[in-house]
Image (cartoon, rainbow, N blue to C red):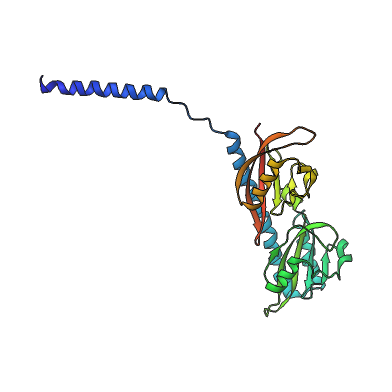
Amino acid sequence: MSFSRYPWFIAIAAVLIAAGAGFMMLNQPSAPPADDGATDAAAALIELQSEITEALETLDGRLSHATLAIGRTGLDDDAARAILADLSATDPAIVDCTVSNTEGTLIAIEPAEYRGTEGADIRDQLHVQHILASKRPIMSEVITVAEGFPAVVINAPIFTEEGQFVGISSIVFQPELLIAERVAKDSPFDTMVVQTDGRILYDTDPTQIGRMTFEDPLYADYPDLLDAARRVSTERYGTVTYVFGTDGQAVQKEITWTTAGLHGVEWRVAVIREIG
């Protein structure tokens, strides 16, 4: 056999190998289709987490700026009250803004409709004890504030220009209003924001806002949901499925969550979609 024929044999062999490989590829099972719902849910979650984080940081920044000004004016004069009134008008979620002295006594509250609470002793509140001891900003979880309703409080220490600690400035706000302003109105997903203790701060279903997940009888007959809630409580992000429904219409759902927060206090931010 002439050596000149070898290239032909090599070419034919290459064609046969390529054809065989192509045949094998045609017989391989196709990759599963992408889950567009999961992708869209993840994108919606990232956007919402960003919006909530920005909103909390904006409140904190405005409080910090106001606190510096109050440190220059004094705690309970007209100038301080004007600063508090202006601060309370910067976001519809804010109920009022306050100043307390180093004894933990409320000495100025704006707007004027809440001044009846001035003079209240708030030293029993954990976030107040923290800032009196540490002189560092803090955000509370939902508590019943001195004004008599559930709310979240952001506190900042007040220092004079000479560096003397003289009191505490606070923003009192309703988390469900803060969150609702950031939820996309046309979202195809349900939205939930929950504290790590299971208290629901916001839900697409307003009847669930304020419920304690691990204690409320509404959830007692859904062990999958409670297992999912425990994971949400303890893990900073993740995805899990569960079964839940009202009026006897239980459906399978998937919850994807991540974390937002301020000054070490964490909120779990979640989007939920039906998958069954």
- Determine the residue positioned at 68% across, 57% down: 56
Name the foreground residue: 167 vs 266. 266
User: Is residue 160 rendered to the left or right of residue 107?
Assistant: left
Quadrant position of residue 242: top right
Residue 69 position (above or below residue 205): below
- Quadrant that contains the N terminus: top left
- Determine the residue positioned at 75% across, 66% down: 126
Residue 48 position (above or below residue 14): below
- Determine the residue positioned at 74% across, 49% down: 214
Quadrant position of residue 173: bottom right
Q: Position of residue 72 (x, y in %)?
A: 72, 75
Q: Position of residue 216 (x, y in %)?
A: 79, 47
Q: Position of residue 94 (x, y in %)?
A: 77, 57
Name the foreground residue: 208 vs 204. 208
Name the foreground residue: 183 vs 147. 147
Name the foreground residue: 214 vs 18. 214
- Quadrant that contains the C terminus: top right
Q: Position of residue 134 (x, y in %)?
A: 68, 72
Quadrant position of residue 149: bottom right
- Determine the residue positioned at 60% across, 46% down: 238
Residue 200 position (above or below residue 147): above
